[in-house]
Image (cartoon, grey):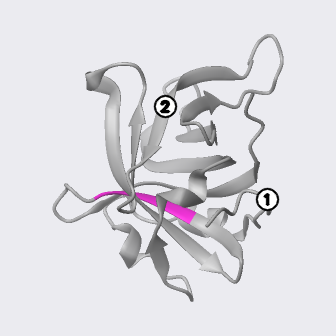
Amino acid sequence: MRYGSVIQPVFALTFFMATSATAGCLNESLPFAPEADASALSGNAILATSPSTIDPTTGQLETWKEDHCGNGDLYKLGSSTPVDPRAYRGTWTDNGDGTVTYNYGSAATTYTWKLYAYRKGPFVSALCWEDTAANPPTTIATGSIITTGSCP
């Protein structure tokens, strides 16, 4: 199913930002259960925060603002100014098993994570990326769909 035509509410982002970096996505306590579903990304822009990675330039938790194009391209969403332009970053792949693979240009920068979509009715209200290879599974980032994508 494609959910890119609906702008989702961002209420869950604040909740997720306060969660522990050691808890897996299934340990988050929302009133509805998540589904492993990487297809929720297709054609959508996301805003996510890593609960354990600090951006060295700001001293803040690292945030990702990315556009997941339906053709597999991945763009960083800047402020569209000359100082912070939108930029191609690599590719993303829905593996069909609830996992998503990100490739930022080399084997050393390829990551595969389980993506959980928290749905309330027709909306994807929150997303959670989980490293299932870690023992116990670890939350990599949490966030939400902020708009439908603007892919070329």
Q: Secondary structure at mark 2?
A: strand
Is 130 one of the magenta-colored residues?
A: yes
Question: Does residue 29 sit above or below 135 in this rendering?
Answer: below
Q: Which mark is residue 24?
A: none
Question: Does residue 148 sit above or below 89 in this rendering?
Answer: below
Q: Residue at x 33, y 39 (%)?
A: 111
The residue indicated by pointer 1 is 5
Question: Does residue 13 sit above or below 85 in this rendering?
Answer: below
Disc 1 residue type (three-letter): Ser
Nearer to the camera, 70 or 29: 70
Q: Quadrant of residue 17?
A: bottom right
Is most of the magenta stretch helix, strand or loop? Answer: strand
Q: Secondary structure at mark 1?
A: loop
The residue indicated by pointer 2 is 91
Q: Position of residue 125 (x, y in %)?
A: 66, 70
Report the span colored magenta: 127-131
Nearer to the camera, 61 or 76: 76
